[in-house]
Amino acid sequence: MEFKNMGLSPNTLHALGSLRYLEATEVQERVIPAILSGKNVMVRSQTGTGKTAAFGIAIVERLFGHKNRKALVLSPTRELAMQICKEIRLIASFYHMRILVVYGGHGLGEEISDLRRGVDILVATPGRLLDLSERRAVNLSEFDFVVLDEADRMLDMGFIPDIDRIMSQVSHERMTHLFSATLARQIYDIASKYIRDPEVIEVGELEKVAEIEEECIYLARSEKFGRLTGILLSRPTDKVIIFGATKRVVDYLWRRLNDQGIRAGAIHGDLSQSKRTKTMNDFKENRSRILVATDVAARGIHVENVALIINYDEAMDADTHLHRIGRTGRMGKSGKAITFVENKVVNRGSDQDYRDIFKTAPRRHTPRIPRPR
């Protein structure tokens, strides 16, 4: 469906046209009308399907003409929060709306000053929002439109107590919308606390979004770096993301790769915001084709044309594995994921986890996500 046939305001259509957004994706076609009709929604949608624009368009449309309405978008990471804010600002570029983003990792002073000048749409990480609320820089009861984005990752990262505190303070007459890559039982439990009578929208199995060939390589720890460099040198033009289990591993890989003349960037939570932003811009703009990252940092990665994912360290569970490999094969393009599994992991009997993930290797990954009973 074309956006011009969805009953959107002229200013919104003008902004979408300037962005060359003409045809709605499946998630946009289903979510926008539901929200505009006054429904709360609970959406399963993979990264890369246009979900940010889906709730961004809906927020702008719902707030237009209602001066007393305010929207809050909660995001698990600062990178993702910044990306969401940027996209909503573009969608709202022909409106007089004040759109702010707040996140940890830098001083509070500027954010407090900005908030005191007013806000229509606030994008925030949970911890930072609570800090600002405790300092009376923001009144949570003023927000009557709430989006919980990447709810599965907020669950994984232990943000639910913070979410509980936030949701207890926002308007009781709010609309609440939840977006998640999976709708496991725990996500339904979260929704039951926060959302009244949600319409459940499940968009696209993974194979509709991505076609990912997976390969699992069993090897000794001492062999891993040599195998990594061999793979990278054999694919000299591919855009690659390498996942390490810890910040220390990420720093180690970054140093060794660059020492060997393989230019790479690194991103994890201990880096300054300016460094993280520069690294991501270099990667997006092809000044660097290799990015080494932790799982937490990866939730803010929205980069097209990533050809290869290398799991230098194995994922701790299947959901984390899916989040990792979801960085490639976006918007219907094919991709490849290679996972290193250390022999000692197999020898201590935990390789069953990887047999569950890799039924065959290589293969096309097409998971099914069951609804809780």
Image (tube, rainbow, N blue to C red):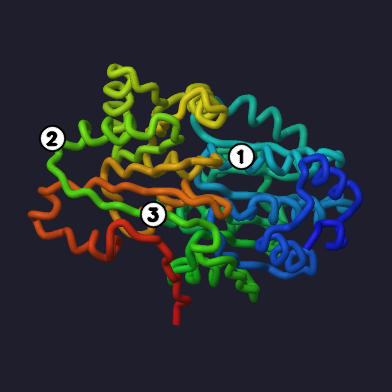
Q: CA distance from mark 1 to mark 3?
A: 28 Å
Give the mark toward the camera: 2 or 1.
2
Q: Residues within 10 Å of mark 1 (few under 14, many from 20)?
A: some
Mark 2 or 1, nearer chain start? 1
Where is mark 1, residue-wise? 83
Q: Is residue 189 left or right of residue 124?
A: left
Q: Amino acid at mark 1?
A: Gln
- Whether residues under marks 1 and 3 lie with C-beta atoms below 8 angstroms apart, the answer is no
Mark 1 or 3, nearer chain start? 1
Q: Amino acid at mark 2?
A: Ser
Where is mark 3, residue-wise? 213
Q: Give x and y (percent) for residue 22.
A: 79, 51
Q: Residue at x 49, y 68 (%)?
A: 183
Q: Amino acid at mark 3?
A: Glu
Mark 2 or 3, nearer chain start? 3
Q: Is residue 296 left or right of residue 352?
A: right
Q: Which mark is residue 222?
A: 2
Count of numbered tags:
3
Q: Nearer the viewer, residue 174 or 299?
A: 299
Residue 107 appearing in the image: yes
Q: Is residue 325 left or right of residue 167?
A: left
Q: Residue at x 56, y 55 (%)?
A: 332
Q: Give x and y (percent) for residue 351.
A: 17, 59
Q: Secondary structure at mark 2?
A: helix
Q: Residues within 10 Å of mark 3 (few under 14, many from 20)?
A: some
Q: Which mark is residue 122?
A: none
Q: Residue at x 72, y 70 (%)?
A: 39
Q: CA distance from mark 2 to mark 3?
A: 26 Å
Q: Residues within 10 Å of mark 2 (few under 14, many from 20)?
A: few
